[in-house]
Image (cartoon, rainbow, N blue to C red):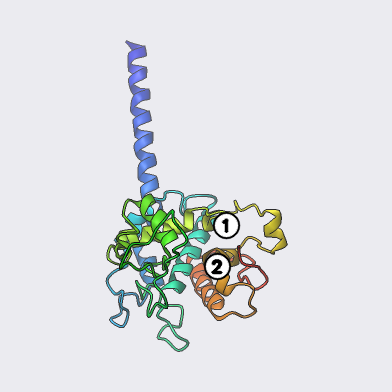
Amino acid sequence: MAQHSFLLVCFYLSISSILSFGQTEASSIESLVPRSLYDSIFIHKDNTACPANGFYTYESFVQATRRFPRFGGVGSPETRRLEVAAFLAQISHETTGGWATAPDGPYAWGLCFKEEVSPQSIYCDSSNTQWPCFPNKTYQGRGPIQLSWNYNYGPAGRALGFDGLRNPETVSTNSVIAFQTALWFWMTTQSPKPSCHDVMVGRYRPTEADLAANRIGGFGLTTNIINGGLECGIPGDGPVNDRIGYFQRYAGLFKVATGPNLDCENQRPFA
């Protein structure tokens, strides 16, 4: 009888631990980024001047992160806050509506757009037969990370449960999926590139090729991963500096140091 009671207690404690773990995991982002902080970061995202006003809700952001529990969930509390600050800075630059003399400064206008303005092409790489383009579909930048090209829409859609090649516009009509595509890009290793997540949590291990290209860890390397071909290896690049400006502002709000290597002007882009 005593043994039976002991087993029941152990079973109860095990179930309680599992439930407690699930609640902790589900609430981790809310703890790192409470609604009040989200609102103070994205001061003007719902301004009527922003085409995406009303789209990037706090609820959609939180729901999207639940698909990626390791986002903001690895390392010390400082490391977790740093990663989230870096991610939010990068998506803010990608969707910025700010300008030099903007109200509250140029770095208070993230998440202003949900789709690329005046795309210069349909972003179809016809040589990529694994992720073929569909007729009358375009793969320009959409969502927080401005997901672009058929070879990104295809695997993102497969990973997230929507048809990114047949229905790429989903990224600009469903706010949860929009955030999920940004997190998918952030969390996913696409060789030879490391994931932005691994870079910001200190798990990046440069190869010989990386060292030769001066691709060292830090916020600047996430810029290289996202858009290095157009922005890295260029002294004083404007878009790079805009990304850094957002990061510095958000790091201050998260009360965490940015660390070194913020730019990528001395890095060669990935091949």
Rendered image: mark on residue 223:
2
| SS assignment at label 2 | helix
Give residue 84's position: percent from left, percent from top.
47, 60
Front-most of residues 199 and 118: 118
Q: Which amino acid type is marked by label 1?
A: Lys
Residue at 46% over, 53% down: 71
* Residue 95 point in image, percent of width and height: 41, 73
- Could you tell whether 48 is left or right of 221 in the image? left
Q: Which residue is mark 1?
A: 193
The residue lying at 37 percent from left, 57 percent from top is 180
Q: Secondary structure at mark 1?
A: loop
Of the 4 image quadrants, the one containing the C terminus is: bottom right
Residue 257 seen by the camera? no
Task: Tell me which corner region of the image, top left, top right, bottom left or bottom right, holds residue 265.
Answer: bottom right
Q: Residue at x 36, y 18 (%)?
A: 7
Query: What is the x, y in percent for residue 257?
Result: 58, 65
Q: Position of residue 160 (x, y in %)?
A: 35, 52
The answer to whether the residues at label 1 and label 2 have Cβ atoms under 8 Å apart is: no
Q: Is residue 66 left or right of residue 226?
A: left
Three-letter residue code for mark 2:
Thr
